[in-house]
Image: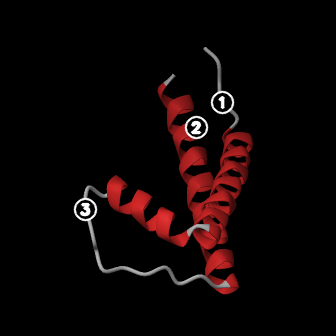
Amino acid sequence: MMKIKPLTLGIATAIAFAIVWTLCFIFVWVLPSLSMNVFEDMMHSTEMGMEWHISMSGFLVGLVVWSVCGGFTAWLLAVIYNKLS
């Protein structure tokens, strides 16, 4: 059976999450109205009364949190997969 390298998968996932977070942030920053419409469609709701609050600190916090959480989850998944295989 093939083993997955947990650290490699975790780092790759963290990088992927960082890229997706950055693209999403840019999309919301450049097209806030369209972004809200897409978000409402994804949540199966309309006129949620929300507003976007765009800031550099919000971007950085989200970047770190999503990357760390995504990387940790991928690492954990690989560890569990390797134990089960």
Point out which mark residue 58 bears. none
- Residue tagged 1: 4
Picture coordinates of residue 6, whole percent (x, y): 66, 41
| Three-letter amino acid code of the residue under disc 2 | Ala
Which quadrant is the N terminus positioned in?
A: top right
State the residue at coordinates (63%, 61%): 21
- Asked whether disc 2 touches disc 1, contact meaning CB atoms under 8 Å apart, the reply is yes
- Residue tagged 3: 45
- Asked whether disc 1 touches disc 3, contact meaning CB atoms under 8 Å apart, the reply is no
Picture coordinates of residue 17, whole percent (x, y): 64, 54
Q: CA distance from mark 2 to mark 1?
A: 6 Å
Left or right: 65 as drawn, with respect to 84 = right
- Decide which of tag 1 and tag 3 comes sooner along the chain: 1
* Mark 1 or mark 3, whichever is nearer to me: 3
- Decide which of tag 2 and tag 1 comes sooner along the chain: 1
| Camera-nearest residue between 9 and 61 | 61
63 up-or-down from 78: above or below: below
* Mark 2 or mark 3, whichever is nearer to me: 3
Q: CA distance from mark 1 to mark 3?
A: 39 Å
| Three-letter amino acid code of the residue under disc 1 | Ile
| Camera-nearest residue between 71 and 23 | 23
Q: Residues within 10 Å of mark 1 (few under 14, many from 20)?
A: some
State the residue at coordinates (67%, 66%): 26
- Residue tagged 2: 78
41 up-or-down from 64: above or below: above
Q: CA distance from mark 2 to mark 3?
A: 35 Å
Q: Residues within 10 Å of mark 3 (few under 14, many from 20)?
A: few
The quadrant where residue 28 appears: bottom right
| Three-letter amino acid code of the residue under disc 3 | Ser
- Decide which of tag 2 and tag 3 comes sooner along the chain: 3
